Amino acid sequence: MDEKSAGGNRIFQLHELEELRNEAYENHRIYKEKTKTFHDKYISRKKFDVGQKKDYY
């Protein structure tokens, strides 16, 4: 293998690696959004009024 083809092959590998990295980053972002949506759906909203006090018995 001569130097030019080896260099070109290495650049190609680096581009592939960068694409895989970007794809993993995007998949992680999507996973976080879906997890947050799922979590937020099951959080119960509470309303508190001034002077309201809960008994802990």
Image: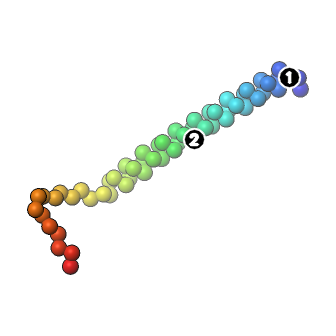
Tell me the quarter of the picture where residue 18 sits: top right
| Disc number placed over residue 3 in the picture, else none | 1
Q: Residue furthest right?
A: 1
* 9 in relation to 55, above or below: above
Do tag 1 and tag 2 residues touch (Cβ < 8 Å)? Answer: no
Residue drawn at point x = 12 percent, y = 58 percent = 49
Amino acid carrying mark 2 in the image:
Ala
- The numbered mark, 1 or 2, whose residue comes first in the sequence reads 1
Q: Position of residue 27 (x, y in %)?
A: 52, 42
Frontmost residue, 51 versus 11:
51
In the rendered view, does 34 fall on the left or right side of 45? right
In the rendered view, does 36 fall on the left or right side of 54? right
Q: Residue furthest front?
A: 51
Tell me the quarter of the picture where residue 7 sits: top right
Camera-side mark, 1 or 2? 1
The C terminus: image quadrant: bottom left
Q: Residue furthest left?
A: 51
**Looking at the image, how many numbered discs can be counted on the residues?**
2
- Circle 2 sits in a helix, a strand or a loop, which is it? helix
The N terminus: image quadrant: top right
Q: Residue furthest bottom?
A: 57
Amino acid carrying mark 1 in the image:
Glu
The 10 Å Cα crowd at callout 2, few under 14, some 14 to 19, many 20 or more, is few
Tell me the residue that label 2 is attached to. Answer: 24
Marks 1/2: CA–CA distance: 31 Å
Residue drawn at point x = 77 percent, y = 23 percent = 8
* 42 in relation to 53, above or below: above
Residue drawn at point x = 32 percent, y = 53 percent = 41
In the rendered view, does 1 fall on the left or right side of 7? right
Q: Position of residue 29 (x, y in %)?
A: 48, 42
| Disc number placed over residue 54 in the picture, else none | none
Q: Position of residue 51 (x, y in %)?
A: 10, 62
